[in-house]
Image (cartoon, coloured by chain):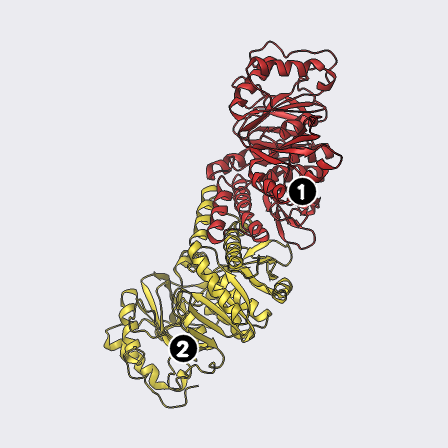
Chain colours: A yellow, B red
């Protein structure tokens, strides 16, 4: 038996009862002969409460101090969890991100991990302890200041520690049973996926699946750390995310479609009347990039020959819409467009699956399903293993259900639709 | 203008409004040209709430993890305070005990400071920042674990930093106006003391005065750091505690009596029927000391010649009574006493003042005052500058008021009672 890293989110440790339940599960893993490292988030709403307090004393909390404040949340949960484990008769020690050797850059509130030096964790394990580590936080390499890792930070902490400690698996405990073929709140017939490849999971995460964040999956793929996403409320097997299917997990060879993701958090900006000449797109996206705005899909329509003008559309998080519009307007003369259109009533539906590109039938079936459901397509974008379309926000749920059914993913389907080829 | 260390307790930063009020006061000191280091406690009831949580997950929280938990409280208050100061347009950085260089021994929950290496604080100050430091906590020298300093820990942090940074003064902000000649809740006519010598303050603290703890005063005396105890809710001068009266503060030469302290937190144990031979007391107090019980007064009565037996009484915190009784009973044969008497309905009244020993009239007047008030004395103990008596708990308030009046300390007295000699 080797080393396992387990990560528990805020909903799993929301109160004293939750902490005691999680402690029992950790002790089970230890009793099964594993060395156990646990990464824990702040209890329930603690982080939100701290943010509220910060806003009461200062309208724009500063980076360094804001991180110092927020990291108190994990400090509380990890200490309580260690106590609960000791109360079950097992040895446990808790470590801050800094003590655990999580070294980051100095970008407060969204630092990136640049190194992990888990010497103290290793010592604690060798002495027979369970190690409890604060998620979401680290210490900056240059200034030795406390940093936080931003969204999905605790998952990333867990994967990074698993990599540095050469763990067998990184178990991500959450309040759902695993990764599903679609969001079960939208598609009641969605099925739990037993195994999914890193690449497919990356596309699902990029396309709006919330269970694992892109950043954490990317880290796991780079270091080839298998992730097991599962519920902290049951003993069920969840979803394995890895490069190769785990032995004993059924690999459904024909299932070249992993799932359907959707996302209604984005908006669309169309730059209208752009001269159709080399370098125009570069100027536009340099402007956007200089404004520190992250964009998602980009589509350029064919230009009308008569005018020599074209339109360029892109999607971006709604929260960054104002910033992008301002930056483009400010550089209107430099870019030379006619007008801007902003639309935040859009949704994105993505079909993800390996080998999709080599099966042209997939794309056709996808569009047919959308068309049969009466859903109009506004933008299309594809990758090796994903097709995404932008539709009206109101059409998203219907579109997801239609696609899910069309590809035989519904739980009452006999089996998934089979295309030629061997899958992967 | 030099460097000042300011310490704010939990009641001063109980909520966002309190934090903003304290921030303004800190900024004032900075505007007056001082370099400012602030030591802050956890907000209001935060520490108690964390203790509650700990008790919910584990009946006997462990030392190391308990410290990790409790230190989250100061982390929150210090980060919020730094944000509030920045919001007023001044630069501030917060530091944990570890970051501030507060090095302690490894005795969790009541660590002692063994060194202070405030390099990061000095740098922050030199760069024009206000430095905010978490009170009550440090890092252990050997294991690099987070420790807490126990009761009065934040005051001690402040004094220790003031010493290490060679501060002009350590200002302790609290919810009262300073140190009084007696507890104003018991003696409404008690007067604020403008200046008091370290030695007298030590005796007052040891005798039950709650404003400053013994340990903090001891540290200040050793490094000769003047302490200014004052209210965070007003701009009034408070009480200066130092080796020499500060210029401009009236030194009342005749006031050889500093004040009257009382304490009802102790119990009395009497070991009855102890053989009156050398070494007996040593065996008893070795037994007590091995049980890690702190004792206060010790009194041995003259033995009755007929029996060759004597009684030994001592006082100790009520909370440690059970432990002491158990330890003595367990070693009954080794000690050879007849029985134990435990009494937790006692109170202690102490009169403190320099030069007392050279003025026999003081002692006589003290006993006369108690007698006139009908208060019976059970034990007596004296030091160079203190007389303490143990009475029934019910008599304490009356006794304190009687003594306060008898020594002319009441605020409507014309002046304090003058004895021969120069005072100090």
In the rendered structure, the answer to whether residue B317 lies left or right of residue A343 reads: right
Q: Which residue, given by chain and number where applicable, does mark 2 sit on?
A: A194
The residue nearer to you, when weighing B56 against B268, is B268
In the rendered structure, the answer to whether residue B50 lies left or right of residue A310 reads: right
Q: Give coordinates of residue A28: x percent, y percent.
A: 49, 67
Give how far apart the Cα atoms at labels 1 and 2 are. 64 Å
The residue nearer to you, when weighing B78 against B52, is B52
Question: Up-down: is B161 above or below B424?
Answer: below
Disc 2 element: loop
Of all chains, the one bearing label 2 is A
Residue B135 can be seen in this image: no
Question: Up-down: is A118 above or below B147?
Answer: below
Q: Give coordinates of residue B315: x percent, y percent.
A: 61, 32
Residue A50 can be seen in this image: yes
Question: Up-down: is B82 above or below B347?
Answer: below
Mark 1 crowdedness (10 Å alpha carbons): few <14, some 14-19, many ≥20: some
Residue A202 found in image quarter: bottom left
Q: Give coordinates of residue B68: x percent, y percent.
A: 57, 51
Question: Up-down: is B320 above or below A75?
Answer: above
The residue nearer to you, when weighing B390 against B281, is B281
- Same subunit, tags 1 and 2: no
């Amino acid at each position: 038996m080797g080393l396992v890293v387990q990560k528990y989110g805020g909903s799993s440790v929301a109160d004293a009862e939750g902490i005691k339940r999680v402690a029992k599960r950790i002790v089970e893993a230890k009793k099964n002969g594993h060395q156990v490292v646990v990464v824990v988030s702040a209890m329930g709403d603690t982080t939100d409460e701290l943010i509220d307090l910060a806003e009461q004393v200062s309208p724009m909390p500063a980076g360094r101090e804001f991180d110092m404040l927020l990291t108190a949340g994990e400090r509380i949960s990890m200490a309580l969890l260690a106590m609960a484990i000791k109360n079950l008769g097992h040895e446990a020690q808790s470590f801050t991100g800094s003590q655990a050797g999580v070294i980051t850059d100095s970008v407060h509130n969204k630092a990136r991990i640049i190194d992990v030096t888990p010497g103290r964790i290793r010592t604690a394990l060798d002495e027979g302890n369970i190690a409890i580590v604060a998620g979401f936080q680290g210490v900056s390499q240059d200034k030795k200041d406390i940093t936080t890792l931003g969204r999905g930070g605790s998952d990333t902490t867990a994967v990074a520690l698993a990599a540095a400690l050469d763990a067998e698996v990184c178990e991500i405990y959450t309040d759902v049973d695993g990764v599903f073929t679609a969001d079960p709140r939208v598609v009641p017939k969605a099925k739990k996926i037993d195994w999914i490849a890193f690449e497919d999971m990356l596309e699902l995460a990029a396309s709006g699946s919330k269970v694992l964040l892109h950043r954490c999956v990317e880290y796991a793929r780079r270091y080839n750390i298998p992730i097991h996403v599962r519920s902290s409320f049951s003993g069920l097997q969840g979803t394995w995310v890895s490069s190769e299917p785990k032995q004993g997990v059924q690999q459904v060879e024909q299932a070249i479609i992993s799932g359907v993701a959707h996302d209604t958090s984005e908006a669309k900006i169309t730059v209208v009347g752009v001269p159709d000449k080399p370098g125009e797109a570069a100027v536009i996206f340099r402007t956007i990039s200089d404004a520190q705005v992250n964009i998602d899909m980009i589509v350029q329509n064919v230009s009308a020959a008569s005018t020599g003008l074209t339109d360029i559309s892109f999607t971006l998080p709604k929260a960054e819409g104002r910033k992008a519009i301002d930056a483009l307007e400010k550089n209107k003369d430099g870019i030379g467009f006619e007008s801007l259109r902003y639309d935040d009533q859009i949704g994105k539906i993505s079909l993800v699956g390996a080998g999709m590109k080599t099966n042209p039938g997939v794309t056709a079936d996808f569009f047919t399903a959308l068309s049969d459901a009466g859903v109009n397509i506004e933008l299309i974008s594809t990758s090796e293993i994903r097709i995404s379309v932008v539709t009206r926000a109101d059409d998203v749920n219907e579109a997801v259900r239609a696609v899910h059914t069309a590809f035989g993913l519904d739980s009452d389907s006999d089996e998934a639709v089979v295309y030629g080829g061997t899958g992967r």
